[in-house]
Amino acid sequence: MSIGPSTSPTTTIEVLLHEIEATPQEHWADLLDNLRQFRQNISPAAGVVIDIEQAQRNQAAIDLLDSWLGDGEDAAEHQQSWDFLKTALDEDRLSGRPLFP
């Protein structure tokens, strides 16, 4: 199977995954080493294609996650919220068993 310039990225990935799956697993470490050596030897200008819109969406998601991590809440506040949530969820259960024992 030949991969040419008109081949879509999805098709290319599928072909690569097929080749990896067809390779016995005991040889995957060697395959990975070969791939890394190949990547290091190719021209940097020849390989990197950046989808600007996707990069912006990725950065927005990263920024959102970072904001959640750095919101200044402490562990005690998280524990208090969790305890309240567990109690509220267990209050009106039809079963006598707690949802979170």
Image (spheres, rainbow, N blue to C red):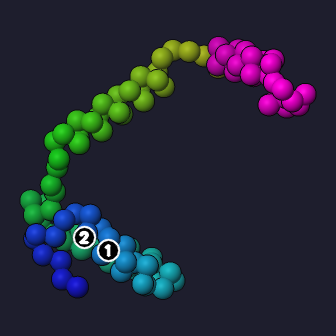
Q: What stretch is highlighted in magenta?
A: 76-101
Q: Can residue 83 be seen in this view?
A: no
Q: Which image quadrant: the C terminus?
A: top right
Main secondary structure type of the part rendered in magenta: helix
Viewer-proximal residue among 90 and 40: 90
The answer to whether residue 55 of the structure is visible from this angle is yes
Going by the image, does 28 lie left or right of 47?
right
Numbered label attached to residue 38? none
Quadrant where the image shows the N terminus: bottom left
The numbered disc on residue 12 is: 2
Which residue occupies 84% across, 26% down? 94
Q: Residues within 10 Å of mark 2 (few under 14, many from 20)?
A: some
| Residue at position x 35%, y 28% in the image | 63
Circle 1/circle 2 CB separation < 8 Å: yes
Q: Measure how far apart labels 1 and 2 are at the Cα level.
A: 6 Å
Asked if residue 14 is positioned above or below residue 49 in the image, the reply reads below
- Tell me the kind of residue under disc 1: Leu
Tell me, for residue 16, which label it has, or none: 1
Please indicate whether residue 78 sits to the left or right of residue 95 in the image. Answer: left
In the image, is residue 53 part of the stretch drawn in magenta?
no
Secondary-structure class at tag 2: helix
- Please tell me how crowded label 1 is: few (under 14), some (14-19), or many (20+) other residues with Cα within 10 Å: few
Relative height, residue 48 to residue 37 (above, below): above
User: Residue 76: percent from the left, percent from the top?
Assistant: 68, 15
Please name whichever residue, 33 or 84, is drawn nearer the observer in this view of the structure.
84
Q: Is residue 83 magenta?
A: yes
For the residue marked with disc 2, what is the amino acid? Thr
Q: What secondary structure is marked by label 1?
A: helix
